Image (tube, grey):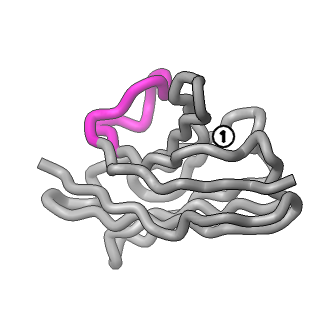
Amino acid sequence: QVQLVESGGGLVQAGGSLRLSCAASGRSFSSLAMGWFRQAPGKEREFVAAISMSGGSTYYADSVKGRFTIARDNAKNTVALQMNSLKPEDTGVYYCAARNSYYGRWSEANYWGQGTQVTVAS
């Protein structure tokens, strides 16, 4: 079993930045592809970003491309999401996710964190 714990959410003004972090335990971190999803109020959860086991490949939703950066540290068992130029529509609960495979459609994951709230004020 894999445990994922997010941190770093909060309230920020539009145009500002936040950095989310996720700590993983319970299994070899380097054997997991990692990702971030988000869920806005009244909407379905959506994919945000993903990173391969080695960190050599990344993949972003079009809505965040160029503004968000996903990175991982396999020595520390952590994955981070740097969010810049935040917009009110980025508001939501952000979930850290882990998958057994990086490839394939990132619509679901094998393991989920509890989520952390991000609120972007206009």
* Farthest bottom residue in view: 76
In the displayed structure image, the side of residue 110 where residue 47 appears, left or right: right
Query: What residue span does the magenta drawing correspond to?
Result: 98-111
Q: Residue at x 60, y 65 (%)?
A: 10
Q: Judge by depth and name the residue closer to the eye, 71 or 45.
A: 45
Residue 46 sits above or below residue 29 on the image: above
Q: Judge by depth and name the residue closer to the eye, 104 or 62.
A: 62
| Label 1 crowd bin: few (<14), some (14–19), many (20+), radius 10 Å | some
Q: Position of residue 70 (x, y in %)?
A: 59, 57
Q: Position of residue 13 (x, y in %)?
A: 82, 64
The residue carrying mark 1 is 60
Q: Residue at x 82, y 49 (%)?
A: 87
In the displayed structure image, the side of residue 82 where residue 115 appears, left or right: left
Q: Position of residue 77 (x, y in %)?
A: 32, 69
Q: How many marks?
A: 1
Q: Residue at x 68, y 46 (%)?
A: 91
Dividing the picture into quadrants, the one containing residue 79 is bottom left
Q: Position of residue 18 (x, y in %)?
A: 67, 68
In the displayed structure image, the side of residue 63 where residue 27 appears, left or right: left
- Numbered disc 1: secondary structure: strand
Residue 17 sits above or below residue 111 on the image: below
Task: Please check the rendered image and state whether residue 104 is part of the magenta-colored stretch, yes or no.
Answer: yes
Task: Please check the rendered image and state whether residue 54 is part of the magenta-colored stretch, yes or no.
Answer: no
Q: Residue at x 42, y 37 (%)?
A: 102
Q: Judge by depth and name the residue closer to the eye, 1 or 100.
A: 1
**Residue kind at label 1, given as amino acid type:** Tyr
